[in-house]
Amino acid sequence: MTTTAPIPTALPPRAERIRYGALIVLMLMGFLLVTAEFLPNGVLTEMADELGVTPGQAGQTVTVTALVGLIVAPTVGLMFPRLDRRSLLVWMALAAAVSNLIVAISPNLIIILLARFLLGAAISAFWAMSITVAARLTGPERLGRGVMFTSAGVSLATVAGVPLGVMLSELVDWRMVFAIAGVLMVLLAVALRLSLPSVPAAQASSLRLLVDTLRRPGIGLGMIGHILVVLGHFSAYTYVRLALERIPDVDASTIVVLLALFGLGGLAGNITIGLVIDRSFAFFAVFAPLVIAAAVISMILLSGTVVGVAIVVLVWGFFFSSWLIVANTWVGHRMPDRLEAGGSLVVVGFQAAIMIAAGVGGLLVDTLSVELVYVIGAVSLIAGAAFFGASNRVRA
């Protein structure tokens, strides 16, 4: 199953036609990986009780995947510089399957945390390689269409994946939920091997290449903007439950509906923006963060009305859930000869911003207020839009 290929220095070949079947398989991979990443959220109480740990300790099963992703994203291409990317994705799907199956039979939290390292590696490898594979399936000129499918899997997981895990946990033991996820990942590995064409490794053979990519005109500015956008979003979204609880007389079922609206908005945004992103990525790199910033501030200003907040979360989800489409399409058009390097940098920025947002945001929420966190998040989003605007003015 493992094949090797020389590292190309030219652009990925133009696809004669878009391979929609393969793109759907990639979408399913994104869906299953993100669903597995956040499965502990839905079974946290049951997992903590059986393992004899606190819910906070059990929650570290999610934290560890982000930490591993921060390490793996910039190095996976360096560790496998010549491995065909189809084979790499197949192996990563199998690694995620092994992770879920180990969790299903693990007797303690330590083994579960170690198993989740495999899942974190698989998630980051998928995101780092998804641009290269999408370009192979669609051609560079229609890269945004391909990225739309990979990002749609994530949005679909936010709408249905985690709630599906919660529903399954009501029917079967939490360990069986992870076992089912493991079996599905094995089937996905088979589908990847059968549906994807050979995807030669792109040029990402050294850390020097990653640094050199950042030094290209406008690229460093854009990456700073990307980090600020993700930081601003997650500073607010990590504590969205606290913001929603400010609504007078709100109950748990209403909060669930509002969070579902965020996911539905994201799914709609993926499809809508994905269809036009190849012609308008520079515009959305500035416009989307500004709209998200307005939504974040509106969450505080409109907290007295459920209808107002519902509209806000729908708009918020519409624009942020498509952010990976914007960022990855920007990479594809600004550095088409460095797709893996650019994809790795996007994932590193994403993971670093999530960790900073959760840590600093938690400190501010505990010591000051959720309102201040939302204001800081909006300022970060506006700054991110400004950096992307400056990047767009630099000639590639």
Image (tube, grey):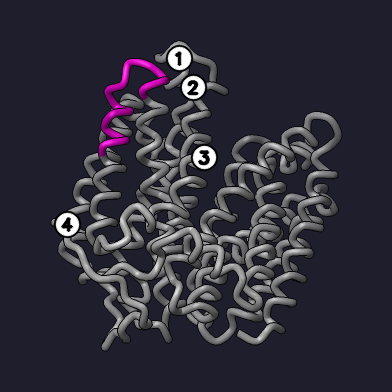
Mark 3 Cα shell of 10 Å, populated few (<14), some (14-19), many (≥20) = some
Q: Tell me the distance, in whole angstroms, between the alpha carbons under discs 1 and 3.
A: 25 Å
x and y percentages locating residue 187 in the rendered image: 19, 50
Can the viewer see residue 185 in this picture?
yes
Q: Tell me the distance, in whole angstroms, between the alpha carbons under discs 4 and 2.
A: 40 Å
Q: Which residue is mark 2?
A: 45
Which residue: 65% across, 73% down?
285
Q: Nearer the viewer, mark 4 or mark 1?
A: 4
Disc 1 and disc 3 in contact, CB within 8 angstroms? no
The relative height of residue 367 versus residue 294 in the rendered view (above or below) is: above
Which amino acid, by three-letter code, is at mark 2? Thr
* 86 horizontally vs 308: left or right: left
Residue 90 belongs to magenta span: no
Which residue: 22% across, 58% down?
87
Q: Which residue is mark 1?
A: 49
Q: Nearer the viewer, mark 4 or mark 2?
A: 4
* 154 horizontally vs 285: left or right: left
Q: Tell me the distance, in whole angstroms, between the alpha carbons under discs 1 and 2.
A: 6 Å
x and y percentages locating residue 42 in the rendered image: 47, 33
Secondary structure at numbered mark 1: helix
Q: Pick whichever, 146 or 251, lies toward us.
A: 146
Q: Along the polypeptide, which appears first: circle 4 or circle 2? A: 4
Res 111 → quadrant: top left
Magenta region: which residues?
98-111
Quadrant location of the N terminus in the rendered image? bottom left
Q: Nearer the viewer, mark 1 or mark 3?
A: 3
Q: Which residue is mark 4?
A: 2
Q: Tell me the distance, in whole angstroms, between the alpha carbons under discs 2 and 3.
A: 23 Å
Dominant secondary structure of the magenta stretch? Answer: helix
Mark 1 Cα shell of 10 Å, populated few (<14), some (14-19), many (≥20) = few
x and y percentages locating residue 116 in the rendered image: 39, 34
Q: Which residue is mark 3?
A: 67
